[in-house]
Amino acid sequence: MITAHLTDTEIQLYVAEPETISDQLKTHVQNCVDCQTNIANYQLLFNGIHNQAKPQFDFNLTNLVLEQLPEPKRAFPWAAVLISVFSVMLIASLALFFSSYIEATITSVSTVLTATAITAAVVILIFQGVEMVKNHQKQVHTLLNTKTLQL
């Protein structure tokens, strides 16, 4: 049996989550009048806090806050547009410049090699799609299992 009394933290834990307390502490509480008195006080305090009315505003706080926020400025993504236009122009000019080489390469490639390349590309896309779905499901599972704070 424990000769020292329970600390305030142990008493609060005993009141809030009695299943987490060791059997040794439970035995001490059953035999100690001082600890039983402290537990009764904490139970009364916890019940009073739990039964207390939730504070309510007589105004809509959300609307008041939203009214004070500045309107977001929508900026046109000039950098992305310029980079995209430059990239398309570069690819088109290279394709035009090397078109005779590209045409010769495509016509000289055998059908088996073309089929193999297409099959490999499709298999890679399938594996990437499956991996994306698995990651998405994992993230959704993680979000649904997180505990939220309740006031």
Image (cartoon, helix red, strand yellow):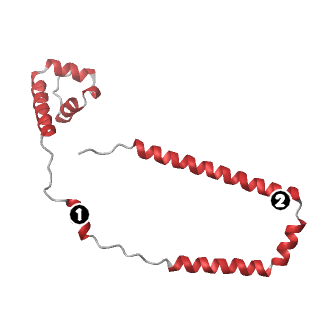
Name the quadrant of the C terminus: top left
* Label placed on residue 37: none
When the figure is inspected, residue 98 is found, relative to residue 51, above or below; the finding is: below
Left or right of residue 114: residue 140: left
From the top left corner, tell me how far across and down residue 87 is, in percent: 64, 77
Q: Residue at x 21, y 65 (%)?
A: 64
Category of crowding for the residue at label 2, using alpha-carbon neighbours closer than 10 angstroms: few (below 14), some (14–19), many (at least 20): few
Q: Residue at x 81, y 77 (%)?
A: 99
Label 2 and label 1: CA atoms lie apart by: 61 Å
From the top left corner, tell me how far across and down residue 143 is, in percent: 42, 47
Left or right of residue 51: residue 149: right
Dot 1: what SS? Answer: helix
* Label placed on residue 63: 1
Name the quadrant of the N terminus: top left
From the top left corner, tell me how far across and down residue 83 is, in percent: 58, 78
When the figure is inspected, residue 98 is found, relative to residue 3, above or below; the finding is: below
Choose the circle earlier in sequence order: 2 or 1.
1
For this rendering, which residue is in front, 27 or 85? 85
When the figure is inspected, residue 61 is found, relative to residue 147, above or below; the finding is: below
Category of crowding for the residue at label 1, using alpha-carbon neighbours closer than 10 angstroms: few (below 14), some (14–19), many (at least 20): few
Badge 2 amino acid: Thr
Q: Residue at x 10, y 31 (%)?
A: 41
Residue pointed to by mark 2: 114
Badge 1 amino acid: Asn
Is label 2 or label 1 in front?
1
Dot 2: what SS? Answer: helix
For this rendering, which residue is in front, 76 or 135? 76
Left or right of residue 45: residue 113: right
**Circles 2 and 1 in contact, beta carbons < 8 Å:** no
